[in-house]
């Protein structure tokens, strides 16, 4: 049974929990795979968003996707890093949150993703919501004394 407290949490708007776009490491359409690999390695993040110059969200790119793309039959084809574009490698089929979604939708989606990209109605990237932030909120509610 859903208690009043959890109902309150599940219906909470997500906007207070978003890491804003300006704080999110990303690459742009037009960047090559080498640049994306550099950003991913330097930041230590497993995957980052791919945006266009208007900050519209297009997909996610990860070190694994990049390494898969240069994996030849007998060797790693490092020379391809410079010539391949992030758009050829990134995953476009990504579940996203809308800025107006509630906590329940984030909770449902985050089970399979370490973080979720948040977009507005125009498809502009607003930021990310991480599993860490969602679990922190959940913990707060689970440990809260019953009212
Ligand atoms: P965390 O919960 O901090 O471990 O983040 C989980 C994942 O979310 C990371 O591996 C990244 O893929 C992504 N992430 C978190 N913070 C950022 C950020 N500031 N910029 C880009 N990606 C991020």
Image: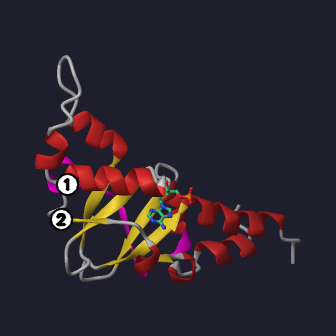
Residue 93 visible in image: no
As for residue 25 lying within the magenta part, the answer is no
Label 2 near label 1: C-beta < 8 Å? Answer: yes
Q: Quadrant of the C terminus?
A: bottom right
**Left or right: 79 in relation to 101:** left
95 part of magenta stretch: yes
Would you say 46 lies left or right of 124 here? right
Q: Which secondary structure, mark 2?
A: loop
Q: Which residue is drawn at 36% across and 65% down?
A: 96
Which of 77/64 is in front?
77
Q: In this view, does 84 lie above or below 108?
A: above
Along the line of sight, the residue nearer the viewer: 16 or 81: 81
Mark sitting on residue 86? 1
Q: Which circle's residue, 1 or 2, is located before the other in the chain? A: 2
Percent across and percent down for residue 47 are: 39, 53
Stretch in magenta: 86-103
Q: Where is residue 104 in the image (x, y as percent from the top left)?
A: 54, 68
Tell me the residue at 74%/63% (across/down): 139
Q: Mark 2 points at which residue?
A: 29
Q: For mark 2, does the 10 Å Cα neighbourhood hold few (<14), some (14 to 19), or many (20 or more) residues?
A: some
Question: Which residue lies at the image location 46% right of the left edge and 58% below the top edge?
Answer: 43
Q: Which residue lies furthest to the top in this view?
A: 74
Q: Can residue 74 be seen in this view?
A: yes
Numbered-mark total: 2
Residue positioned most to the left: 83
Query: In the image, residue 44 lies at what x, y percent?
Result: 48, 52
Circle 1 residues within 10 Å: few <14, some 14–19, many ≥20:
many
Q: Which image quarter: residue 7? A: bottom right
């Amino acid at each position: 049974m859903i208690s009043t407290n959890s109902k309150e949490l599940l219906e909470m708007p997500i906007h207070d929990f978003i890491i804003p776009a300006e704080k999110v490491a990303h690459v742009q359409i037009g960047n090559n795979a080498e640049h994306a690999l550099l950003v991913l390695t330097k930041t230590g993040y497993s995957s980052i968003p791919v945006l266009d110059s208007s900050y519209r969200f297009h997909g996610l790119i990860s070190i694994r996707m990049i390494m898969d793309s240069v994996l030849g039959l007998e060797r790693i084809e490092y020379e391809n890093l410079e010539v391949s574009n992030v758009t050829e490698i990134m995953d476009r089929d990504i579940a996203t949150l809308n800025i107006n979604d509630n906590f329940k939708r984030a909770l449902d989606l985050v089970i399979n993703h370490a973080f979720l990209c948040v977009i507005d109605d125009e498809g502009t990237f607003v930021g990310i919501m991480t599993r860490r932030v969602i679990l922190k909120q959940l913990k707060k509610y689970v440990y809260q004394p019953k009212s």
